[in-house]
Amino acid sequence: AGAPGGTAEDPVARARAAAEAAKLELEAAKLRAEAEEMQRTMAKERRVTRARQLLNACGIDNCYGEDLDRQTGAAARDLESVTAEMLREKLGEVVGVTLTEEQTRELMAACRPGQADVPSLGFQDLSSVEFDATLDRFTREAQLAKQKANAEAAARNAELAAQRQARERGGRTEVVYTPGEVNDDRELPTRLLSVLAYLLPLLDGLQFGRPLVQFVPALMPIFAFLAVPNAVLDAIPFGQLIVFFAMSIASSNKELPRLLRLNLQQGIYLDIALFLPSITFQLFGLISGGGGKVPPEIGIGVFVLLVLAIAYSVVTTLLGQDPDGVPGISKMAKDRVDRDL
């Protein structure tokens, strides 16, 4: 006999709930498998495309949009292989990374384990997973060196600015300025120009936000749009460093509107803050012998915090107010700008 009050239906309800949960799990597993397969296909196409470019099968701008079989055939019909010297030159043109002779030998040896001397690499070598993994490691090491150089340059710039300010004060204990001496222009052109200061940290932060596209595919058009200025900046030698120093110099120009200078300085500090997670994990990876990559979960968290800080700063600036609500960073930026007055 069933229990009173209709509780005899509970096992049926539980069975239905379990079946629905199992169905959802199967659908989730299917979606994960499809995503993984798509990633593998895209990775293979990327390796094949790069191999074609390294073998001069086509130009960088017209190697995309063709099917995989045509890519393989085109690569095979061009150069059969590249030597170490040719590989170094082509990697600089195609990938934008400059390898040392020792790194080039290690890269070639990774494609053919156990072979003492590898005189050249063919299409299969250049499109292999081993080539891709080794090149990716060298690229990360180059990025780490670039980030450390940027951080050191920023520290030197800040130190020189502090020394210059100390010399300008020349022992004066207090300086009083009247409001009329401060350029406090907050007109629309100034506000629009001020929000552009956050483009540099946003572009530098894209590396942390890319895994977010897997969870929110609707963000893909935004990332694709931001990839254009990012590519332009990367195409310029030391482009990011040039923009960084230009922003730093402009933020110290007393003739510019204070609102613009404040946003420039805040954008600089946000960009510097992005170096911390990358340097921390990459240094740890070099010490421990691991990959040194920032975990996707932490990277997404860093990107979300960055976007929130930028969104707040942009909205506040467009309203004609000081964006002084970002914890820590806003105070440093405001103190720096007001100290220059």
Image (cartoon, rainbow, N blue to C red):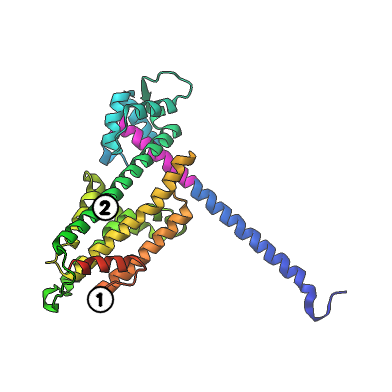
The disc labelled 1 sits on which kind of residue? Gln
What residue would you read off at disc 1?
321
Give the quadrant of the N terminus.
Answer: bottom right
In this orientation, does residue 290 appear?
no
The disc labelled 2 sits on which kind of residue? Ala
Residue placed at 20% from the left, 66% from the top? 261
Quarter of the image for residue 88 reads top left
Foreground pick, 48 / 282: 282
Quarter of the image for residue 252 reads bottom left
Residue placed at 20% from the left, 50% from the top? 242
Total of numbered circles in the picture? 2
Foreground pick, 156 / 195: 156
Tell me, yes or no, whether the highlighted magenta stretch contains residue 44: yes
Which sits earlier in the primary sequence, circle 1 or circle 2? 2
Foreground pick, 154 / 315: 154
Residue 123 at x, y = what percent? 38, 28
Query: Which secondary structure class fits the magenta region best?
Result: helix
Quarter of the image for residue 121 reads top left
Q: From the viewer's perspective, is the residue at label 1 or at label 2 nearer?
A: 2
**In this rendering, is residue 148 above or below 271?**
above
The magenta region covers 37-58
Describe the element under mark 1 as helix, strand or loop. loop
Foreground pick, 291 / 332: 332
Residue 191 at x, y = what percent? 20, 71
**In this rendering, is residue 336 above or below 153?**
below
Left or right of 18, for residue 259: left
Residue 105 at x, y = what percent? 37, 25
What residue would you read off at disc 2?
154
Describe the element under mark 2 as helix, strand or loop. helix
Left or right of 250, for residue 117: right
